[in-house]
Amino acid sequence: MVTATRAQPRERGGPLGVAVLGSTGSIGRSTLDVIEASAGRFSTWLLAAHRSTSALLEQARRMRPAWVVVVDEQAAADVDPRSLPAGTRLAVGPEALDDLVRNPAIDRVVSAIVGAAGLRSTWAAVEAGKAVALANKETLVMAGPLVMALAARCGATILPVDSEHSAVHQALCSGQHADVKRIVLTASGGPFRTKPREALATVTPAEALAHPTWSMGPKITIDSATMMNKALEIIEARWLFDMPAEKIAVLVHPQSIVHSMVEFVDGSVIAQLSPPDMRLPIQYALTYPERTEGPARKFDFTRPMTLEFEPPDVERFPAVRLGHEAAARGGTAGAVLNAANEAAVGRFLAGGLRFTDIAEACARVLDEHPFEAEPTLDEILRLDSWARQEVATWSGC
């Protein structure tokens, strides 16, 4: 389950300090909208980005944080500290970010760095006992048991930002953990939900990046198109909610209105509904257990609405099956699947793999990796590198 029932209380007067890791991405930008609309409840203490220095500097002038961090040292060389607003300081590199995220001035950490790169800073925040609003699903996909055990030891709170896991967290408040029959994660189905299976091999990156509902970064958008995002979300839910893989299902819902559901043993199904707007789960994670007015879109119940649901086609989208397999195996399976997928998506976007090769390469690497049931963090990181190298040299069947 989520590590704590309440977010960390205020220990001092004034706004709560927020660190936004990955501030220039879609989740980071939406987080700044939430902070600005919070009527002074939150303030931006730290902004961090990897290479997007121009956007980061613009955000710094807008939000006036105490610190900005450029993780990539080469990109940081182009930043003139004199361009920062008065009172804002510049730090460079992953070590600096790890140190700053532990600062007592930070009350909430929004972990929104995409991919495996987000594990390190999230680990530092959890180790420091912070309240972590987790948008980086790869942290739990790669090292779920280790991260949740660390949070329990250090008194950290982990609250999900993914719309699906936020919905599950909210629905679970309606009953006891022991009474849950299953969690149902909804999926939009992406742009190829109805595309013939035989036509998927010729899908171009431009076609795969045209998501019908959400506006996201390229890697996450491709994951939605392959439904690998659901595979990773199955693994994340396995550890976040302490739920066995066989109790986690996926249901395609093209309208993206029902963000996920929880079915209880008595047959009751509790769902969380809202217009597709990431500012709502971000705000819920920041204010939990309270709810406040915010900038997210609201329903217009004067207009008709149709909601559709259908089971996923795992022959067309085999990634869903891989997610269940990795969640059931545990150990190093999640880390290897995630690394293989990141590498395969990169090759697809660069024109080196076909769309259908993404899941095929991931399945091959997952099957052939040297599985460890109870890995250390170092072993997880070693196999992360191994999986990427395997995909880099994979040429298909």
Image (cartoon, helix red, strand yellow):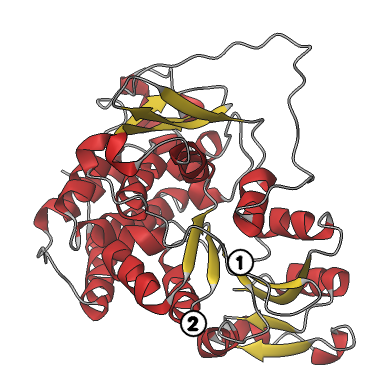
Query: Residue 298: x and y, percent?
Result: 75, 31
Dot 1 or dot 2: first in sequence order is 1
Q: Quadrant of residue 119?
A: bottom left
Residue 391, can we see it?
A: no
Q: For label 2, count other residues whose C-alpha is less than 10 Å away and answer few (under 14), some (14-19) or many (20+).
A: many
Q: Residue at x 23, y 48 (%)?
A: 327
Query: Residue 256: x and y, percent?
Result: 56, 28
Examine the rendered structure and indicate whether residue 105 appears above or below residue 170.
below
In the image, 109: left or right of 61?
Answer: left
In the image, 230: left or right of 26?
Answer: left
Examine the rendered structure and indicate whether residue 97 appears above or below residue 24.
below
Q: Amino acid at mark 1?
A: Gly
Along the line of sight, the residue nearer the viewer: 159 or 118: 159
Q: Quadrant of the C terminus?
A: top left
Along the line of sight, the residue nearer the viewer: 153 or 68: 153
Q: Residue at x 31, y 31 (%)?
A: 317
Calculate the distance from the C-alpha at mark 1 to the C-alpha at mark 2.
19 Å
Q: Which residue is mark 1?
A: 22
Q: For label 1, count other residues whose C-alpha is less than 10 Å away and answer few (under 14), some (14-19) or many (20+).
A: many
Along the line of sight, the residue nearer the viewer: 188 or 356: 188
Examine the rendered structure and indicate whether residue 201 appears above or below residue 304.
below
Q: Amino acid at mark 2?
A: Ala
Along the line of sight, the residue nearer the viewer: 16 or 326: 16
Looking at the rendered structure, the secondary structure element under dot 1 is loop
Looking at the rendered structure, the secondary structure element under dot 2 is loop
In the image, 109: left or right of 18?
Answer: left
Query: Residue 68: x and y, percent?
Result: 71, 81
In the image, 281: left or right of 315?
Answer: right
Q: Mark on residue 390?
A: none
Q: Quadrant of residue 387?
A: bottom left
Furthest-right residue in this view: 86
Q: Which residue is mark 2?
A: 128
